[in-house]
Image (cartoon, helix red, strand yellow):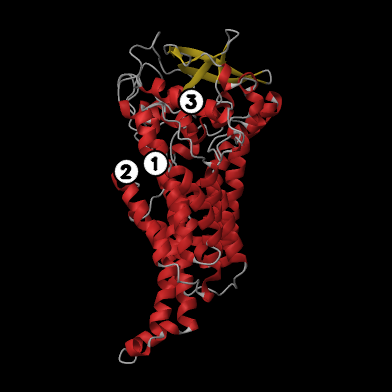
Amino acid sequence: MAWHDPAFATAGAIGLAVLCCVFAFVRYPSEARPARTIVVGLAITLGLFGFGLGDEPGIADAARAEALGNALEYARLIALAAGLLSILRPSFAIFPMVYFAFHKDVTRAVSGAAELGRNDYAPLIEVGLFLACGLIVLSLLQSVSRLKPVTRNLPSLDELGTRNFAAQAAGILLLAGIGAHFGNYFMSGMAKITLDGGPLSWVLENPTSSIMLAGYSLGAAPLGFSESLLTLAYEAFRAVQIPMNVVILAAQLLCFVAFWRRRWLIGLTAFFDLMHIGIFLLSGALFLHWIILNSLIVAALTRMKENSFSTIAIVTGILVTIFGHVVFYNARLGWYDSRQIRQAHFEALTEEGDWVRVAPSFFRDASYLLYARHFSFHEYRHESGHVPTSAFGQIGIRDVQPKSSEVASSNYEVMKLTNECAYPVEQPVTPPDYDTARPALFILGQHNRAENLANSVIAVDYNLYPHHHYSMPFLHRDFEAQDPRDIVAYRYVVDTVCLDVADGKIVRRVMTQTLGPRIDVRQ
């Protein structure tokens, strides 16, 4: 419920956390070791991530900071401890998962975003909670079956205590959990074939390789240390773009077939991990949480025999993959890409009078906002003089209005124009196409946090936070050299850029720009 109605987030978090204490006496079923592997792995991972999020939320409003109190400081310590204790009890796995979601919701509220982006972490949390709670229920059923006063007049309940029943139930639970995760890939495939250009428009016409240019322009591309190497990789990727699109789409749409064989399931899960690693190396978009979950699934399955799953378990996995989106949160990663892109960033004014571009990783838990949300650009719904894309050039992920239906009446038409950098933009863009009040409140809180951490005896570098997109330090050298205590002011900048490759270099041509007012951070 918290995914769809933030008002229930706190109440849901408290309710689920109480389960940690209420069911602390419940042990792991011995027949469910593969599911236990996934649950413990996720709990420890999220416990460490939750601890690493820190307790500085970056709030400029002192009253709101006081209202939050020390909740983050104490809760992250409990989350870390509970993650480690999940080795012993499944109920302890619940708290770090809930806390991670709670902290994300705090970040969303502090940043003023209607949504911060759940695709990166929500599937991981839901699968973990589903498996942890399932293991608790399975263990309780086994305990009930041993109570003779309860079962002697109900012969069917005697079966609950058998190892055969427990093994079958554990198999169903495991494949249902894997199906909930695979639903993200299946629904992403469905999103691609239901784009408004037709079922084959993404495969045959989408310029998928342009994400490499976008990643470099944002300062997130790992290959950006060498422009010549990046451009060479870009040309190679563009040459095999259509075959790669076919392979990715087929793997996503047919992922449910892998449930028929354990080895197929291992192979496809490993393929998805390699796909995520490749996407990160080429563009900088890191699905770290998905990679960890896939690795845990492979580790769990490799310890099992080929015929470990019953037909019921296999069918359950297939059905949850295809229809699980009705219950679970499934990412729908299907859009058109572009090389004409709307990109926004902050610039910092140094004491020497130079404006330097701020690395998005500087904003720690709110870094995703700079890559995707643009201070509610997507929710603001004004007709924009900029090109209607995300910072990575995504077209069609939100109901963003084109400047005029005479220019483009569909996302497909926008993609065709932007692929040639032919989408018309205004000179200059007025009024701004985002909520102009939000950048100042956001940056004041973030700068205050940066100064506090700079004065701290022990401060974790913002590049060590588990970002969805990392700002490569070698692409932000000017900002990396700055001490936040020496920054005088900031400003928010929105560009529409055309990206291309020429003579072994990435060409970033600014087509139009919105320059926000100066935001002073010194009294």
Q: Residues within 10 Å of mark 1 (few under 14, many from 20)?
A: many
x, y percent for residue 382: 30, 22
| Residue for point 63% across, 37% down | 281
| Residue for point 45% across, 59% down | 179
Kind of residue at badge 3 = Asn
Is label 1 or label 3 in front?
Answer: 3
Judging by the rendered image, the residue that carries numbered circle 2 is 6
Considering depth in this image, is 275 or 45 the residue closer to the camera?
45
Give the label on residue 289, or none: none
| Residue for point 43% across, 69% down | 136
Q: Residues within 10 Å of mark 2 (few under 14, many from 20)?
A: some
Whichever of labels 2 and 1 marks the residue nearer the N terminus, that label is 2
Judging by the rendered image, the residue that carries numbered circle 1 is 105
x, y percent for residue 109: 36, 35
Evaluate whether residue 253 shows in this view.
no
Would you identify the image quadrant in which residue 211 lies? top right
Q: From what the image shows, is residue 229 above or below residue 40?
A: above
Q: From what the image shows, is residue 478 above or below residue 372?
A: above
Kind of residue at badge 1 = Asp
Q: From what the image shows, is residue 496 above or below residue 225?
A: above
- How much space separates mark 3 and mark 2, taking CA atoms? 26 Å
Side of 172 relative to 262 (left or right): left
Kind of residue at badge 2 = Pro
SS for callout 3: helix
Side of 338 relative to 113 (left or right): right
Judging by the rendered image, the residue that carries numbered circle 3 is 448
Q: Are marks 2 and 1 in contact (CB under 8 Å)?
A: yes
